[in-house]
Image: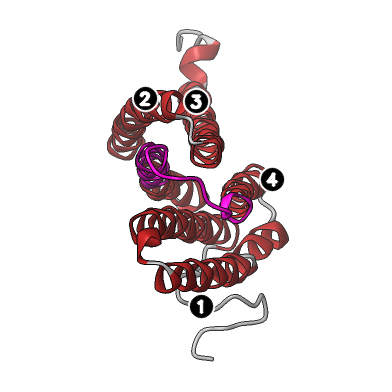
């Protein structure tokens, strides 16, 4: 007589699958926690540079340590899953996507630190009239990163495309800001040191938006299984056009 099999013996693959799903869920949650952290860094960097708040800038710079730890921990988690679970199809796309998104988010944290360093330098210089522009760029940068992460959570192609399209708005803001600050420096050489710091801060926000665009492109890769990099900013774009 064949011995009766326990449920665990009959369906070991079900237990393995549940464990795998739990690992993916933890990976998803930890990625979003890292995203929330870098969003907060963008917000704090904007306050620091607009208000010339040296202490807030210092605290934000210190918080980047946790973002760096997030990057290392998530990379290790992804590599463990790839080695142990051998994921395929959408699961494989998800894990490779996390590896890419973590890199972009770590870089966003670095750029927020760069803005805070400019805030510390600007606090030692005379005030200027560009705070409104900087705040506008910081707000846009944070919203693009936030919406890209929302698109990731919802698997929303249209929201991802909207994020990509908004990169043009940041480019326009940055170009106008650059021209205004340049005119101020040409009109009075005493404005040069301050102008260089302001232009650097603005450029960091422009680069944050580039990484926000990358995050949105990663979402399209997850949802559609297509590499959207260098494809253009219109949903109707197709390879080779």
Q: Which residue is mark 1?
A: 231
Judging from the image, what secondary structure is the residue with disc 4 in?
A: helix
Residue at mark 3: 26
Q: Which circle marks residue 154 in the picture?
A: 4
Gap in Å between the C-alphas at discs 4 and 2? 26 Å
Residue 48 vs residue 115: left or right?
right
- Which one is nearer the viewer's eye here, 42 or 81? 42
- Of callouts 3 and 2, the N-terminal one: 3
Q: Is residue 157 left or right of residue 186?
A: right
Between discs 3 and 1, the one toward the N terminus: 3
Residue 142 rendering spot, x and y as whole percentages: 58, 46
Question: Which residue is label 2 attached to?
Answer: 66
The answer to whether residue 228 is above or below residue 216 is below
Quadrant location of the C terminus in the rendered image: bottom right
**Which residue appears at 33% of the width and 56% of the height?**
193
- Counting from the top left corner in percent of width and height, residue 225 is at 52, 63
Could you tell me how far apart the alpha carbons at marks 3 and 1 are, in whole angstroms? Answer: 32 Å
Q: Are marks 3 and 2 in contact (CB under 8 Å)?
A: no
Answer whether labels 4 and 2 touch (C-beta < 8 Å): no
**Magenta span dominant secondary structure:** helix
- Looking at the picture, the colour scheme in use is secondary structure
Q: Position of residue 92 (x, y in %)?
A: 43, 48
Q: Nearer the viewer, residue 131 or 154?
A: 131
Q: CA distance from mark 2 to mark 1?
A: 34 Å
Mark 1 is surrounded, within 10 Å at the Cα level, by few (under 14), some (14 to 19) or many (20 or more) other residues, namely some
């Amino acid at each position: 007589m064949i011995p009766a099999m326990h449920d665990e013996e009959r369906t070991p693959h079900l237990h393995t699958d549940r464990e795998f799903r739990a690992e993916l869920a933890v990976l998803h949650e930890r990625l979003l926690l890292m995203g929330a952290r870098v969003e907060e860094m963008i917000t704090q960097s904007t306050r620091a540079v607009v208000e010339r708040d040296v202490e807030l800038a210092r605290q934000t710079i210190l918080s980047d340590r946790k973002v760096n730890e997030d990057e290392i921990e998530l990379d290790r988690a992804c590599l463990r899953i790839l080695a142990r679970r051998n994921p395929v199809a959408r699961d494989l796309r998800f894990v490779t996507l996390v590896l890419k998104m973590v890199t972009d988010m770590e870089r966003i944290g670095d750029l927020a630190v760069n803005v805070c360093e400019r805030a510390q330098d600007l606090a030692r210089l005379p005030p200027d009239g560009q705070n409104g522009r900087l705040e506008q760029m910081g707000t846009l940068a944070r919203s693009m990163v936030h919406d890209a992460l929302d698109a990731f959570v919802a698997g929303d192609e249209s929201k991802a495309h909207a994020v990509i399209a908004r990169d043009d708005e940041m480019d326009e803001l940055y170009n106008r800001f650059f021209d205004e600050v340049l005119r101020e420096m040409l009109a009075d050489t005493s404005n040069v040191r301050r102008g260089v710091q302001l232009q650097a801060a603005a450029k960091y926000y422009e680069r944050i938006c580039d990484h926000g665009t990358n995050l949105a492109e990663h979402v399209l890769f997850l949802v559609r299984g297509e590499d959207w990099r260098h494809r253009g900013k219109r949903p109707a774009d197709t390879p080779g056009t």
